[in-house]
Image (cartoon, rainbow, N blue to C red):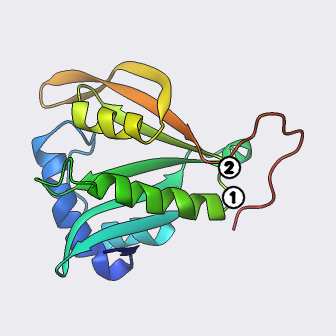
Amino acid sequence: MIRDATTHDAAACAALYAPYVTDTAISFETEPPDTPEMARRIAVAHAWFVLEDEGNIAGYAYATRFAERAAYRWSCETSIYLEQGRRRTGAGRALYEALFQRLRERGFCRAFAGMTLPNDASAGLHRALGFEPAGVYRRVGWKHGAWHDVAWVQKDLRATDGCTSAPGELT
């Protein structure tokens, strides 16, 4: 079941995310966020969905501010994390599709996602969902004794070609 996250999901989301922080370069954080910090992140996100399986949080996807400047307000940055063993099960697609729908409803036009390279699973998921290459930051992050590149991809959530005015205010 996919549903909106609440701050009550913070501990489960933090536990799911922690191995990505401690054991991989997928996340550039070096210390896993605790439950209060994860609750804060859920509360301030543009949207946050969890995949619940038999009462357990098996994945989540969320969108946050893309950049500080006002002109970026119709764009957002997305992220997705699944528990180990959930790849290629449709869970990632289902979470992202729910997220995209909510973002469209809230007036967002573009979604961006960054992926530490190499990450074939994430690259494949984003490509399958219609994300297109936007660029690569070379050797931008140092983690686990090595420099890592980050590929950025973007997805149109709604058309803006030919628009001569900004969309309505975001909700």
Rendered residue at 29%/68% (across/down): 51
Amino acid type at image mark 2: Trp
- 7 up-or-down from 151: above or below: below
Residue drawn at 36 percent across, 52 percent down: 93
Q: Residue at x 60, y 47 (%)?
A: 157
Q: Is residue 157 left or right of residue 107?
A: left
Residue picked out by circle 1: 107
Q: CA distance from mark 1 to mark 2?
A: 7 Å
Any part of residue 161 in sight? yes
In the rendering, which numbered label is found on residue 10?
A: none
Provide the secondary structure element on which disc 2 rests.
loop
Whether residue 45 is visible, yes or no, is no
Q: How many marks?
A: 2
18 relative position to 44: left or right = left
| N-term mark: 1 or 2 | 2
Q: Which quadrant of the rendered structure holds the N terminus?
A: bottom left
Q: Position of residue 170 (x, y in %)?
A: 71, 62
Q: Is residue 141 above or below residue 43?
A: above
Give coordinates of residue 59: x percent, y percent.
26, 62
Q: Which residue is mark 2?
A: 74
Residue at x 15% of width, y 39% of height:
24
Discs 1, 2 touching: Cβ within 8 Å: yes
Residue farthest to the top, as pictured: 138
Q: Is residue 146 above or below residue 102?
A: above
Dot 1 alpha-carbon crowd within 10 angstroms: few under 14, some 14 to 19, many 20 or more: some
Comparing labels 1 and 2, the label whose residue is closer to the camera: 1
Q: Position of residue 113 (x, y in %)?
A: 44, 40
Residue 124 is drawn in which quadrant? top left
